Structure formats: structure tokens, C-alpha cells
Amino acid sequence: MTALHPRPAGECRYDLVALGEVMLRLDPGPGRVRTTRAFSAWEGGGEYNVARGLHRCFGLRTAIVTAFADNDVGRLIEDLIMQGGVDRTFVRWLPSDGVGRTIRNGINFTERGFGVRGARGTSDRGHTAASQLRPEDVDWDHLFGDLGVRWLHTGGVYAALSETTPETIEAAVIAAHRHGTIVSYDLNYRPSLWQAFGGKPRAQEVNRRLARHVDVMIGNEEDFGAALGFETPGVDADLSNLHAANFRRMIEDVTKAYDNLRVVATTLRTVHTATVNDWGAIAWAAGRFVEATHRPGLEIMDRVGGGDSFAAGLVYGLLERGDLAAAVEYGAAHGALAMTTPGDTSMASLPEVEALVRGAGARVQR
């Protein structure tokens, strides 16, 4: 068990609401952005991907709080969100200025990588509508109080988008707690996003402030060091030596510094090549550690979004099962499956996740 006490589903409209930006992802398939002549279009965003996965794979009621410039690109992203089934009630539409001088929609050019060529993302998301969302633009008490939300998810990607997004996050998480909503935060450190806002020192300043309002903290093998300043003993610079015991010691330090945390979870990924990774996860709650099934040599089609899918499975396990061991297994299995398909978002089903949790193999099903 964990120390989390979710609100009853019957008194809430939403199981989870995500706060963050949704971008248009342009994917050159197996090729390169610099040489392609065609892109596949997807939607994606670190916070949104969790809401989408929880709805499409796990069947929970989810919504996104975000903003778009009202033009055809924004409407394309909306159309993709509609296919994912995430509620758009709290999408804020802002008038387009015609050419994107002051407000626009975010675009993410993403290469999947292959073999020795790693995955690569090139963001084009300055001056976006979502980055200009302010605390007063959302009636938080109506959302969390009148309508009811069991879980709020946000993270370090959204915190990095502008000088004001941390303020919007802080307003949201304070209001969420006022109404008994659980708050999760994925550290999701991206050096390119913090480059113009003070780099790693500023990232740590912002994330340390927001961490005081978090119940469930999520990260990957390098996030806790980069985003919060907690180094993991025994880990080399290229992250090729990831032992769960070292991460347990780091998590113990994190939970001593932030006694508000109820659950801490981290994925563990050793990258041998872009298409072969070792994949695992550990989690902590109430002084107890659990570890997911380790999957060495996992074959990867598209690694982007694997951590978000882990977060979705973790939230599902905590909300619906109330069991930390089950939650980390659901998270790791869902993340593994999400990385076998293209795009940021999961194409897995709950029976597939449950089968993988039970140890099913990859034999043909017919």
C-alpha cells in the first residue's frame, strides 16, 4: 500500500487532468529531418502523453489544460487529441496574429534513431500559446472543486517553457491540494528548453520550489541529478552502469529532503544502441522499495514517450490498484510496449499490458 488517498471516482468528473503543452510532432520515419521529403504527423507532449495513455490504454477519464493559437495547425493538433479521446474542455484558444510573431503552436521534429545513430529531437516552440498560459486563465477551484479531479499530472517540460509557466503550475498544484487532488510531477529535464532560462541552475531552482507541492515524483536515470541536484552514487557519465541499489540511496536522500513526497519512481534505461536498451524501474513509498521486471536488451522502435507511458501505467496502478508493486510493473510494461510503435503516444491495450506483466512473450497471436 501507499500513503495516497485518492478521491472517490464517483464524486469526480475526471480521474486525471494533465497541465502542459501539446505539440505537433513531425516524424521523418526511418530517415533524417535534414534530408527527408515527407513527415508523418502526430501529437505529443510530456504531460499530455500521460493523459492520453491513461484514457486509450487504461480506460480512465482524462482531460488536458493547455492553450493553442487558433489557426489550422492548432486545429490539426486538436483533431489528433480528439482521436485520443482526451477531454478538451479546458483548452484555451488564443487569436492567431497571422504569422506567429507573438503567439503560435509548438512543433517538434523528432528522429527515432537507429543503431549507433541516437534519437534526436529539434523543438520549435518559442512564443507558444501554452507557454503564455497564466494562473488566472483557468478557474482552478471550479476544475478541482466543482467538477472534481482525482489526480493532476504536470512536469518539468512545461515548467521550462517560459518565465511564467512555473507560476501557472504552482497555482494549479496548490488548488489541487486544496480540493484533495493527488499531484504527480515528472521532472523530465531537457537541456535545450532551459538553455535560454538560466540553464541547469535555474532548472534546479524552479523544480526544487515546485517539488514542495508534489505527492508523486517521477524521473529517469538522470533527471534527479539534473533537475533537483541529487547525484546517484556509482553512476558513470555515460549512464552505462545503472544499479538499482545506487538509485535507492539517491531516492532516500530525495525523500529526506522532501518529506511531502508519498511516492518516488524512476525508470532505468541503459542505452546500448538506439534500438537496443536495457529497461527497468524502481519505486518507493512509505519506506518500501519495489523493482519492476528488468528487461535487458529490449528492442526499441521509437523511444520517445516511453517514460510518459511508464508514468501512465504507474498512475493507473496507484489509482486503481492502490499497490506500489503492481503500479511499477504496469508502468514498466506499458513503457516497454509504447516503445515498440512510432509516435509519442501509446498504442497498447490493457490486455497487452497485463499479459506482459504476467511474462507473456512475443509469439504471434491469431
Image (spheres, rainbow, N blue to C red):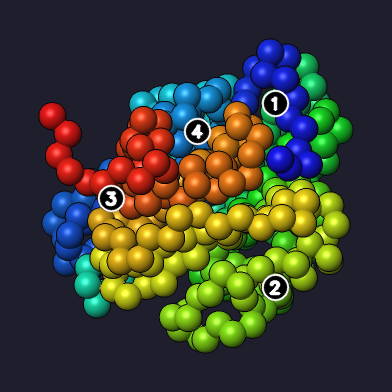
Image quarter for residue 5?
top right
How crowded is the residue under tag 2: few (<14 C-alpha within 10 Å), some, or many (20+)?
A: few
- To which residue does mark 4 refer? 54
Which residue appears at 77% of the width and 57% of the height?
A: 287
Dot 3: element: loop
Image quarter for residue 318?
top right
CA separation in Å, label 2 and label 4 = 30 Å
Which residue appears at 73% of the width and 42% of the height?
A: 2
Observer-side mark, 1 or 3, equals: 3
The residue closer to the viewer here, 361 or 73, is: 361
Compared with 335, 227 (above or below) is below
Observer-side mark, 1 or 2, equals: 2
Observer-side mark, 2 or 4, equals: 2
How crowded is the residue under tag 3: few (<14 C-alpha within 10 Å), some, or many (20+)?
A: some
Q: Residue furthest top?
A: 10
Dot 4: element: helix
- To which residue does mark 3 refer? 340
Dot 2: element: helix
- Residue type indicated by callout 3: Thr
- To which residue does mark 1 refer? 149
Observer-side mark, 3 or 2, equals: 2
- To which residue does mark 2 refer? 249
CA separation in Å, label 3 and label 4 = 18 Å
The residue closer to the viewer here, 144 or 159, is: 144
CA separation in Å, label 1 and label 2 = 33 Å
**Which of disc 2 and disc 3 is earlier in sequence?**
2
Q: Are marks 1 and 2 in contact (CB under 8 Å)?
A: no
Q: Looking at the figure, which quarter contains the C terminus?
A: top left
In the rendered structure, the answer to whether residue 308 lies left or right of residue 186 reads left
Which residue appears at 29% of the width and 73% of the height?
A: 273
